[in-house]
Image (cartoon, grey):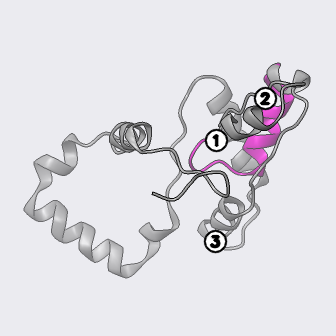
Amino acid sequence: MTGLNARQYQARVWVGNAGYSGHTTVHTLSLLESVPVFRIAQMIILLVGINDLQATLMMEGSPTEQALQRSARRFLDGEISQHEPLHVKSQVYQRAHQLLTRTDAAKVASMAPGWWYGPMRARRKDSPEVCFRTCKPG
């Protein structure tokens, strides 16, 4: 956004990231249909696909559309739907999880779903701006 606005002054650009971890194309379509700001945006760039693949793999080939639509409705209604990541199906993960919960059950129990978002957002906020082609070395 800063780079775009520095190169031209005719049309000020605002860039916002509205991503939500784990959302699929179904979730994105629900947001596009129901959130008014998308109706006035001049450009929307969507990165979709990998979460759709994960949903298909988690459902082991069963249809995903209805489950994802229910999840999207819950999200729009204010519920934060937790998506089970694909790695939890691996035997390595399951065994490691068993060992961890046996040895540190109190710590694991105290961790709310999504506990890492806060520290990761703070880390990203405090990180230096990365720029390509326009930054001088050094």
User: Which x, y percent locates residue 76?
Assistant: 67, 27
Return the residue at label 3: 57
Query: Image height check: is 39 above or below 68?
Result: above
Locate the N terminus by quadrant: top right
Q: Is 101 one of the magenta-colored residues?
A: no
Q: Residue at x 46, y 70 (%)?
A: 87
Return the residue at label 1: 19
Three-letter residue code for mark 2: Val
Residue 22 appears left or right of 102? right
Q: Residue at x 20, y 50 (%)?
A: 108
Magenta segment boundaries in residue numbering:
19-36
Query: Image height check: is 50 above or below 112?
Result: below
Q: Contact, CB < 8 Å: mark 3 with mark 1?
A: no
Return the residue at label 2: 13
Three-letter residue code for mark 3: Leu
Q: CA distance from mark 3 to mark 1?
A: 22 Å
User: Which x, y percent locates residue 21?
Assistant: 56, 47
Question: Along the polypeptide, which appears first: circle 2 or circle 1?
Answer: 2
